[in-house]
Each structure stands twice: as C-alpha cells, then as structure tokens.
Image (cartoon, rainbow, N blue to C red):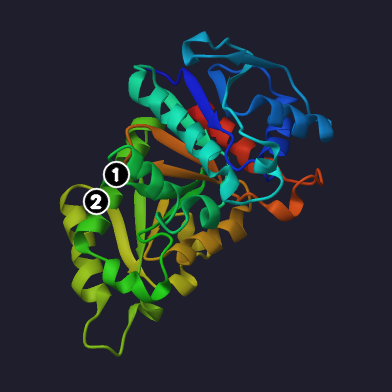
Amino acid sequence: MSISKILIVLGEPYGTFSEILGKYFKKNQKHRQKIILIGNLKLLKKQLNKLKHSFKINKINYHDEAIKDFVNIIDIELKHNKVFDKISIKSNKYIENSFKTCIDILNKSKDKIIMINGPISKKSFLNKKYLGITEYLSKKTNSKNEVMLIYNENLSVSPLTTHIPIKYVSKKITKKKIINNILIIDKFYKKYLGKKAKFAVLGLNPHCETIDKFSEEEKIIKPSINSLKKKGIKVDGPYPADTFFLKKNIIKYDSVIGMYHDQVLSPLKTLFKFNAINLTLGLPFLRISPDHGPNIEMSGKNKSDPSSLIYAMKFIKKLK
C-alpha cells in the first residue's frame, strides 16, 4: 500500500515555516498524495500574503474530504492574535490542538499516511516535560522505541541519545539500546526504501580509548556490534568519531550510529546543509520534520531556505 496522504502540522505560529511552505507550494501544487495542512487558516493566509507567497488552499473539516492536487487545510482555532506576535506559552494550546488533531487522524485512519511537522520552540512548547518532539510524539502515541534518524540519500545518522546534557550520555548507553535502534533503522530501510542498510557505529571516547577502568567501547559497544552481526545485520565499528566522516569512510555505509546528538548531527549538516530531513522511527507512523528550527531571527524577512522541505517531499515520492 503506497502513501495516500501527507499531514503537515504547521507548528510554531511565529517562525519561518509558513514562508517555507509558500515557497514550495507556490511552485508545486500537484502531488500523487493528498496534502492536508493542520493549523490556523487565517494566520497562514496573513503570513503568506505578507511575503507574496500565497497559493490556493481548500478548507476541509475532515481528512476524508481532502482533494487531490489541492493544498487542503483543517482549520485549528486561535483564541487571540497575540498568539503569533512572538514565541511564548500563549501559543502552546494552539500547537497542542494541532498535534492532537493530526495524531487522531493517524490513529483512526487505515490509510498509509506520512506526518510532517513544522518546527516548534522546544523551550516554550515542551517546557522541560519532553526532550524533543521525538519524545513528545512517543508519549502521545504510547510508543517506547522511538529513534531519531537524520536522513540524506547518501548517508543517514542516528544519535543513540538525543537532547540530553553531555554529562549524562555515558549513563544512557546500553547494549539493548544500540541493538534496538539499529534493528529499527534496518527495518525502515527494508520497508520504505527496499534496501538492506550497512551501518557504522562510532565510539564514545576520543580515539575509542579511555584512561578510565570502564571502557564503553569494550564493555557495551563492541558486544552490541557482535550481537547484531549474529542477527545478519551489516555493521562495523566502533570507529573514532574524529576521523570517521572522511569521504573514503562514509561512502562505505548507509547509516552512522553515534553516541550523542552533536557527534553525528554536526558533521552531517556540514556535509549536506539543509538537504536532510529528521525522521522519527518506531512510532505507529513515519514522522518527518524538516531539519531546521523555527528560526525566529529570519521571520518575516523572506530569506528562509526551503531546501529541507523540498528534500522531504522528494523523499516521500521515493518511498515504497
């Protein structure tokens, strides 16, 4: 069964995502899948008109009313205009209702649907209750094995730990988590891309060495790799992170598993800039987020780069 609908949660009302949507849909109206935006129609039109990026929008009440080759929208109420004056807790209820509407559709529909969400302010919306949207969606869907994968067709990366302080990373690295995450990513490559992935695993310590008595590489990472090999997974490592991302190394692999967030996201963004997307695996559905934040400094300036959304839509077209 192929992808039939794409749900796009508009996310933070004060940001650049409406501009990015405008730049994309102004040139791309026709799609194989039905497109459904979830957010406030009046606000979206106001932002699009201001930047001269308006496109035709079809207002619907239920996802089954969506029309192909139109950009449809389910209108989410805004209580007052101050919600979008700046990033603040005033917009939290609106954002929460947008995500709830999307998740309700995903839970009830038997269609194969992809979810895209616009960026939100982690500090304001998540308010320390969740590490990130990955963890937020996991909680809301009663999932326990969510995996962050930053994907480019040439290379993807996945941090074993996500948005936690570096001093806590070593405590969160376990054999079970390494094995589980790689199995989930392997399943994604097979199911959606029709490919058996080859993995590289990075070490935690510089040069995969430590002066400490306990070596994470020897006690956790190497045994995990050996267990995965016995399961038929193509995986090598652990590799020192400081030299791994040389071209001669990365061309051998499809996906790189790092021990913490910046260990793998920094080099990937250096290599591919915005030509990458953030996928959440391990949920009842596939979730995609363009690989940028609300970018409030650029709001209203009409200078935002839509490359990540363009890449996300191209990626969806390739899915099995």
The residue that appears at 74% across and 27% down in the rendered structure is 45
The residue under label 2 is 180
Dot 2 amino acid type: Asn
Rendered location of residue 191, percent (x, y)? 34, 31
Work out how far the residue at label 2 is from the one at label 1, CA to CA, in angstroms.
6 Å
Mark 2 Cα-neighbour bin, 10 Å: few <14, some 14–19, many ≥20: some
Above or below 5: residue 224: below
Q: Does the CB distance between marks 2 and 1 fall below 8 Å?
A: yes
Rendered location of residue 152, percent (x, y)? 52, 46
Above or below 173: residue 51: above
Going by the image, does 41 lie left or right of 3? Answer: right
Tell me, yes or no, if residue 145 can be seen here.
yes
Residue sticking out furthest to the front: 80
- Give the total of numbered labels: 2
Q: Nearer the viewer, residue 128 or 273?
A: 128
Dot 1 amino acid type: Ile
- Under tag 1, what secondary structure? helix
Rendered location of residue 20, percent (x, y)? 70, 38
Q: Nearer the viewer, residue 159 or 186?
A: 159
Tell me, yes or no, if residue 247 can be seen here.
no
The residue that appears at 46% across and 67% down in the rendered structure is 244
Above or below 84: residue 167: below
Above or below 18: residue 221: below
Going by the image, does 53 lie left or right of 278? Answer: right
Question: Could you say which disc has been placed on residue 45 in the image?
Answer: none
Residue sticking out furthest to the bottom: 211
The residue that appears at 53% across and 58% down in the rendered structure is 123
Q: Where is the C terminus found, in terms of image quarters?
A: top left
Rendered location of residue 274, percent (x, y)? 63, 49
Question: Could you say which disc has been placed on residue 184 in the image?
Answer: 1
